[in-house]
Amino acid sequence: MQDDLLRQLHAFSAVAESGGIRPSSLVLARARRIRDELAAVHAQALDSCQRTGSVAALSALFNERRLQLAVALALLGRMPDVAHLTDVSQPAVSQAIARLEADLGQPVFVRGGPRMEPTDIGSRWIIHFTRVLHELQQLRQCAGAYRP
């Protein structure tokens, strides 16, 4: 399952940082970049004057599916289009975006127009989410290269 890789990478990074294992520098470097991208989003959410609720722990952001759906929504602008593209139901897309926004304590998207556009801070977060997804893609490609 895709969400598992991001969460496993989060746990792997924590263990590696504590000195519990000696991972390959390729894997650890990617895990650190992912953590740094999500930590930046988390810090911005905590510091935001637009915050309407509490911000969840950093670990709540380690959910690949939510990040994928947010990036897709930023590109496509409509939940039905995202649902069709990702083969996820529209209610599931809506729920994932609502959960992401709840975890960040504020809206990521502006509602009400013909298209859902990212908020100002949401636009910055989409860039971070895109970088995380790119790192995960690169990690999967590297892992595939080492399979027998």
Image (cartoon, rainbow, N blue to C red):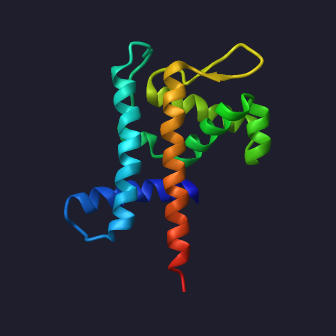
For the point 42% across and 18% down, the residue is 53
Image quarter where the N terminus lies is bottom right
The quadrant of the picture occupied by the C terminus is bottom right
Please name the residue shown 25% across and 70% down the image.
21
Q: Farthest left residue?
A: 19
The vertical placement of 51 against 69, above or below, is above
Q: Residue at x 45, y 14 (%)?
A: 52
Give the vertical position of 112 relative to 99 (above or below). above
Q: Is residue 65 left or right of residue 26?
A: right
Q: Residue furthest bottom?
A: 148
Give the camera-side residue of 130 and 106.
Answer: 130
Number of numbered callouts drawn: 0
Query: Residue 80 location in percent, x, y?
Result: 79, 33
Left or right: where 16 falls relative to 85: left
The residue under the point 51% across, 56% down is: 136
Would you identify the image quadrant in which residue 114 lies? top right
Q: Is residue 62 left or right of residue 47?
A: right
Horizontally, residue 19 falls left or right of residue 131, namely: left
Question: Where is 81 relative to 12, above or below?
Answer: above
Residue 56 image position (x, y, % from top left)? 39, 32
Q: Position of residue 8 (x, y in %)?
A: 42, 59
47 up-or-down from 140: above or below: above
- Write down the quadrant of residue 58 in the picture: top left
Quadrant of the image occupied by residue 105: top left
Q: Position of residue 126 (x, y in %)?
A: 54, 34
